[in-house]
Image (cartoon, rainbow, N blue to C red):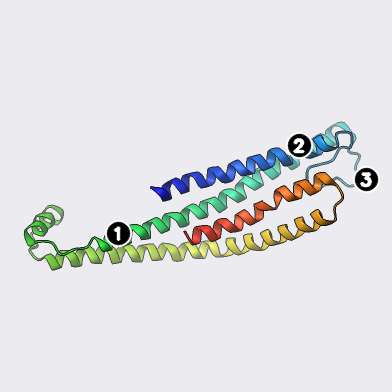
Amino acid sequence: RQSVTVAERLPLAVYAYIALLCLIWFPMPLLVEPHNPKLPFIQLHYWIDHTRFPVYEASYLMQVVSSFFFIFISTGMDCFFAVVMIHVTVQLKLLIYRITEIRLRDAPAVAAESEARWNRDVGDAHAEMYKELCLCIESHQKILGFVKYLESVMNPIALTQFIFSVLAACVTLFQETYNPDISAVFKCASYLPTPGAQVFLYCWGAHS
């Protein structure tokens, strides 16, 4: 139940943080310098007349909408992999519980259960325990097969995510250090937890 609660609340917490970050980040140029039109991320080239009506508004809207969808898709994929790793952990815990519950029981109870389950009489408690152990081994093999498949899928994605998160953190720290604009510094500081949180999701999900 605890793992299910974590799997349900993790995406909600991440999306709530991203939504709060977007509410702070996107209107920042309009609030800090309302008389000097600037875009949230990349500024237009000097040879583009951004004072014309549709140019600045369309560029601002395009950057906001595209960044919003990109951030939510990226973090959604990270949350998906983290939840899948939590699911695998729960399956392994259930398997451990099944193995610890294997006991030698009395033959009449085993025979009755076997007759109801397989429609045949098995009077040997050792045979019943052996069957349960075989089922546990089969489940373990299936889980390991899924883990190998998940690893093959996640390896390039996690490596790419780690590289881009490190690059984003380095570029953000560089801009925060040398940029005299206080609004840009605040935006960079508010963005810094995002790449770290994405890498943390993979590490935390793997060790859960």
Residue beneath the point at 44% across and 63% down = 147
Q: Is residue 156 left or right of residue 134?
A: right
Measured along the vertical axis of the image, is residue 11 above or below residue 86?
above
Which of the 4 quarters of the picture holds residue 130?
bottom left
The residue that disc 3 covers is: 47
Measured along the vertical axis of the image, is residue 56 above or below residue 174?
above
Q: Which SS class for mark 3?
A: loop
The residue that disc 1 covers is: 97
Of the two numbered discs 2 and 3 on the same chain, state the one appearing first in sequence. 2
Query: The disc labelled 3 sits on which kind of residue?
Result: Trp
Give the distance between the C-alpha atoms of the residues marked 1 and 2, in whole angstroms. Answer: 52 Å
Of the two numbered discs 1 and 3 on the same chain, state the one appearing first in sequence. 3
Q: Are marks 2 and 3 in contact (CB under 8 Å)?
A: no
Q: Which SS class for mark 1?
A: helix
Q: Farthest right residue?
A: 47
Q: Position of residue 62 (x, y in %)?
A: 75, 40
Could you classify mark 2 by the number of other residues whose Cα lies within 10 Å: few (under 14), some (14-19), or many (20 or more)?
some
Residue beneath the point at 76% across and 46% down = 187
Query: The disc labelled 1 sits on which kind of residue?
Result: Tyr
